[in-house]
């Protein structure tokens, strides 16, 4: 799990993300209600959202090996902790990071 502080993630209310492997993830219902916002340069990641309620979902329709899912859309408790903050260079001045997770100015290089 990581938190993105870029302006794009903040504006869609989707800044804390859980990274999942595609082989461990499946949509069991409602796939037809998921819409995709296609990214335009300089952005490269498409964003999915629920066409019924508007909730940000992350990249749940991604065909990649792994992708982020918005933590806020997961109904059950997550037994993991935030591991990093990315794009802290774009973090608003009013937000104080209150955990000890690693911080990166842009995307971390793992």
Image (cartoon, rainbow, N blue to C red):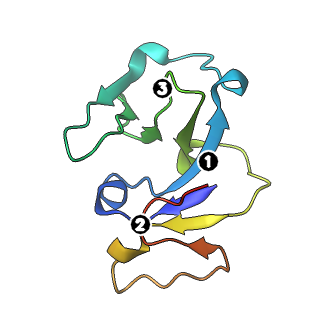
Q: CA distance from mark 1 to mark 3?
A: 14 Å
Q: Is residue 64 left or right of residue 32?
A: right
Gap in angstroms between the C-alphas marked 2 and 1: 14 Å
Q: Quadrant of the N terminus?
A: bottom right
> 92 or 104, which lies in front?
104
Please name the residue that numbered disc 1 is placed on: 18
Q: Earlier in the sequence, mark 1 or mark 3?
A: 1
Q: Residues within 10 Å of mark 2 (few under 14, many from 20)?
A: many
Could you tell me if the residues under marks 2 and 3 are in contact, i.e. CB atoms within 8 Å?
A: no
Name the residue located 74 percent from the left edge and 51 percent from the top edge: 77
Residue 12, image x, y percentages: 33, 51
- Taking the spot 72% from the left edge, 26% from the top edge, the residue there is 24
* Label 2 or label 1, whichever comes before in sequence order: 2
Q: Which mark is residue 83?
A: none
Mark 2 vs mark 3, CA separation in Å: 21 Å
Task: Judge from the rendering whether residue 98 lies leftward or rightward of residue 94; answer left or right.
Answer: right
Determine which residue is flagged by label 2.
Answer: 5
The quadrant of the rendering that contains the C terminus is bottom right
Check disc 2 and report its element: helix, strand or loop.
loop
Q: Residues within 10 Å of mark 3 (few under 14, many from 20)?
A: some
Residue at (55%, 57%) from the top-left corner?
109
Instruction: Find numbered disc 1 in the image and state the secondary structure of the residue it sits on.
Output: strand
Q: In the displayed orientation, state which residue is furthest to the front.
A: 109
Q: Position of residue 72 (x, y in %)?
A: 55, 50
In the image shown, does 28 or 100 lie closer to the viewer? 100
In the drawing, does residue 75 fall left or right of residue 60? Answer: right
Residue holding disc 3: 62
Label 3 secondary element: loop
């Amino acid at each position: 799990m990581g938190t993105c502080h870029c302006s794009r993630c903040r504006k869609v209310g989707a800044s804390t993300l859980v990274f999942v492997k595609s082989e461990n993830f499946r949509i069991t219902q409602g796939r037809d209600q998921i819409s995709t916002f296609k990214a335009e340069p300089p952005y490269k990641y498409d964003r999915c959202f629920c066409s019924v309620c508007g909730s940000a979902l992350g990249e749940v329709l991604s065909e990649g090996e792994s992708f982020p899912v918005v933590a806020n859309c997961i109904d059950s408790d997550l037994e993991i902790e935030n591991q990093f903050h990315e794009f802290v260079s774009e973090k608003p001045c009013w937000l104080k990071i209150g955990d000890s997770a690693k911080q990166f100015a842009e995307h971390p290089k793992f």
